[in-house]
Amino acid sequence: MAEDIKSLDQLKDVVTDTAAPAGADTDTITETAAPREPVRDAAGRAYATGKRKDAVARVWVKAGSGKISVNGKEMNEYFARPVLQMILRQPFDVAGVAGQYDVVATVKGGGLSGQAGAVKHGISKALQLHEPSLRAALKAAGFLTRDSRVVERKKYGKAKARRSFQFSKR
């Protein structure tokens, strides 16, 4: 069969003939990705988990007035530092939907910085599930990718992960 194919057009014909189901017209076969459908529960919320360092956040996003609550407290109360509040607002600013969604999040583990990163990751994932058209902006900003950097474990015979004990010559 390899001797019969002498041009790219012939190769294309052979490939479409083998890939097409029986009785299908090869001219009408086009590969199109199915549009993403919103994933919401009965209450109209989208759910996602976000992770950063040792922190894990469970995040629910629904259409609303822009209220963010973390572990039953307002965002300003739970994350007192302005930098952490800015981190939580980043997905909305990038997607251009600031003030249009309410967020309820529960977060465990890690410190405040890791928790803020986990909630940000969860908000980004839940936003793209609630409104699939926002995925491109969030993906381009890198908010849908989990930041996998974690603290290195302490090794046997070392003071910390890599630091050796102080050397004494005498």
Image (spheres, grey):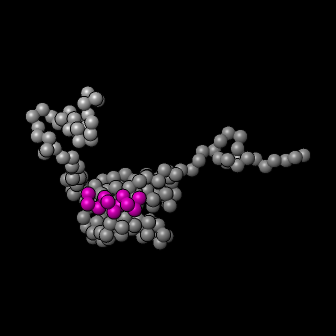
Query: In the displayed image of the protein, which residue is found farthest to the left?
Result: 23
Tell me: residue 14, above or below residue 116. Answer: above
Q: In which quadrant will I find the N terminus?
A: top left
Q: Is residue 109 left or right of residue 68?
A: right
Residue 108 or 154: which is nearer the viewer? 154
Residue 15 location (% of width, % of height):
23, 36
Identify the residue shown where x is 9% and y is 34%: 23
Identify the residue shown where x is 50% and y is 61%: 113
Q: Is residue 28 magenta?
A: no
Identify the residue shown where x is 12% and y is 32%: 22
Residue 75 location (% of width, % of height):
40, 67
Res 84 visible: yes
Res 37 visible: no
Identify the residue shown where x is 30% and y is 65%: 102
Total numbered labels: 0
Residue 13 or 77: which is nearer the viewer? 13
- The range drawn in magenta is 132-142
Residue 88 location (% of width, % of height):
41, 65
Residue 165 location (% of width, % of height):
76, 47
Query: In the displayed image of the protein, which residue is found farthest to the right?
Result: 170
Q: How would you classify the magenta stretch by its main secondary structure? A: helix
Residue 111 or 6: which is nearer the viewer? 6
Q: Is residue 143 left or right of residue 133?
A: right
* Residue 14 location, quadrant: top left
Q: Is residue 138 magenta?
A: yes
